[in-house]
Image (spheres, helix red, strand yellow):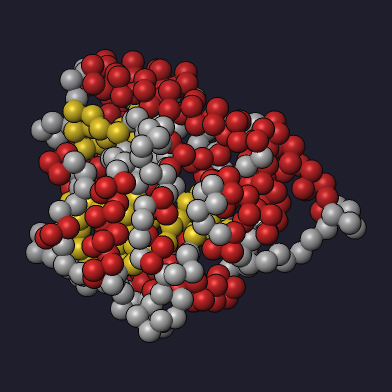
């Protein structure tokens, strides 16, 4: 018999979103007539626009012709897409050869964890996207649970809540090899300012740490003063790499396309450029994003395509405004929902899972319990704005009725 990987055995529950899906299914089975509305997982719902679809169709048609057929591409991505990402999304502050096209930010996170290896020590925002911790646990970068079983011993949890303006107290943070930082944060919606990111960069530099900056929600930032990329901040190229995705930006959650940026100046302790090892991992464990999908990505970044993308973002942001307004009017303490597609609400006097169950079974609305994002998420619920407008409007009416 094969021994079970002990690291996987350390993950107590299932991954957060399948667990929510399981609970939703149970409620549907008990209430087959109920119309459940999901404001849970951040999964895009609106159809892709015509121009982007045409480019995908055209790419497929091409595959049926001798001239248009292509097999394996460059593992790092098509040259023209890397160029377009550098030019359109970074306005030239990163070089095309520093951009690595992928099948999504979650997959890149897993591959980065493989690259840094089981010995790497880790700090994460608390609360934050569960993949940082769960992936690190699977890799064996963590010890067991601490005494109150809410945190892993081997991980530094950087508490980011309203009391510290959602930015960690770095003076109290021990050195780690890696620091994950997501801005706009999933789940709180908090966006770090340039000054805060500069502080983080200086901290990473002083400690010789590497910052893994997750900018998957950056397209939702509307305030021009707020940085959309870590590379807008001075000193970042020596300490940070960035992951990002077309998922939330262009509705590609199912299509699958993302990218990472690893600057040439980022080095390991022995002087090896991180990009050298990243290239090795990408070429060994990944064969590149689908050539069809990359054409779709290119279409999103054309002038016409990008206006369509911005329209879609505006649609989801209007949903976020509707949700935030309703929750606020109901007297809840609500964060996010402005430069982010997520609203983060305190459910006074209730545990996250308790509030989640109550909203699900009474209002038939799926949310995400804050505790799933880390111990500091306890007592909160996240509302996603990814949904059809009618559903969002109906969901807030139901919430007003049951929670208001
Ligand atoms: C979320 O709901 O937090 C995310 O959409 C899940 C994901 O992107 O994997």
Considering depth in this image, is 229 or 40 the residue closer to the camera? 229
Considering depth in this image, is 32 or 377 the residue closer to the camera? 377
The quarter of the displayed image where residue 177 is located: bottom left
Considering depth in this image, is 349 or 128 the residue closer to the camera? 128
Q: Position of residue 81 (x, y in %)?
A: 65, 53
Query: Which residue occupies 36% across, 23% down?
Result: 321
Considering depth in this image, is 229 or 279 the residue closer to the camera? 229
Q: Quadrant of the C terminus?
A: top left
- Above or below residue 102? Residue 44 is above
Q: Position of residue 14 (x, y in %)?
A: 34, 55
Q: Is residue 300 visible?
A: yes
Q: Is residue 24 visible?
A: no
Q: Position of residue 160 (x, y in %)?
A: 20, 47
Q: Is residue 173 left or right of residue 243?
A: left
Q: Is residue 324 left or right of residue 379?
A: right
Query: Which residue occupies 47% across, 51% down?
Result: 244
């Amino acid at each position: 018999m094969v021994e079970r990987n002990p690291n996987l055995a350390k993950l107590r529950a299932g991954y957060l979103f399948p667990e929510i899906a399981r609970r939703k299914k149970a409620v549907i089975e008990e209430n087959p007539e109920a119309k459940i509305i999901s404001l849970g997982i951040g999964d895009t719902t609106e159809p892709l626009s015509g121009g982007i679809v045409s480019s995908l169709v055209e790419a497929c048609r091409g595959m049926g012709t001798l001239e248009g057929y292509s097999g394996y591409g460059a593992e790092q991505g098509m040259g023209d897409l890397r160029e377009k990402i550098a030019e359109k999304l970074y306005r030239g502050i990163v070089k095309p050869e520093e951009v690595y096209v992928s099948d999504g930010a979650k997959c890149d996170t897993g591959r980065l964890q493989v690259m840094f290896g089981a010995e790497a020590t880790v700090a994460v925002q608390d609360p934050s996207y569960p993949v940082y911790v769960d992936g690190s646990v699977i890799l064996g970068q963590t010890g067991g649970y601490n005494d109150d079983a809410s945190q892993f011993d081997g991980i530094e949890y950087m508490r980011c809540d309203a009391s510290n303006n959602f930015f960690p107290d770095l003076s109290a943070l021990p050195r780690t090899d890696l620091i994950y930082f997501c801005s706009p944060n999933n789940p709180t919606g908090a966006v770090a300012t340039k000054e805060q990111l500069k502080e983080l960069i200086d901290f990473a530099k002083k400690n010789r740490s590497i910052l893994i900056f997750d900018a998957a929600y950056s397209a939702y930032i509307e305030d021009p003063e707020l940085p959309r990329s870590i590379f807008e901040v001075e000193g970042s190229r020596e300490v940070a790499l960035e992951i990002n995705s077309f998922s939330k930006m262009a509705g590609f959650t199912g299509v699958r396309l993302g990218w990472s940026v690893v600057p040439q100046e980022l080095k390991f302790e022995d002087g090896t450029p991180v990009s050298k090892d990243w290239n090795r991992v990408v070429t060994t464990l990944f064969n590149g994003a689908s050539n069809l999908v990359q054409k779709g990505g290119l279409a999103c970044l054309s002038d016409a395509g990008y206006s369509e993308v911005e329209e879609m973002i505006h649609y989801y942001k209007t949903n976020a405004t509707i949700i935030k307004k309703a929750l606020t009017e109901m007297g809840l303490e609500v964060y996010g929902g402005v430069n982010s597609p997520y609203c983060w609400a305190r459910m006074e006097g209730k545990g996250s899972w308790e509030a989640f169950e109550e909203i699900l079974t009474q209002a038939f609305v799926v949310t995400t319990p804050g505790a799933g994002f880390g111990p500091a998420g306890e007592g909160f619920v996240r509302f996603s704005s990814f949904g059809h407008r009618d559903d969002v409007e109906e969901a807030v009416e139901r919430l007003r009725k049951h929670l208001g």
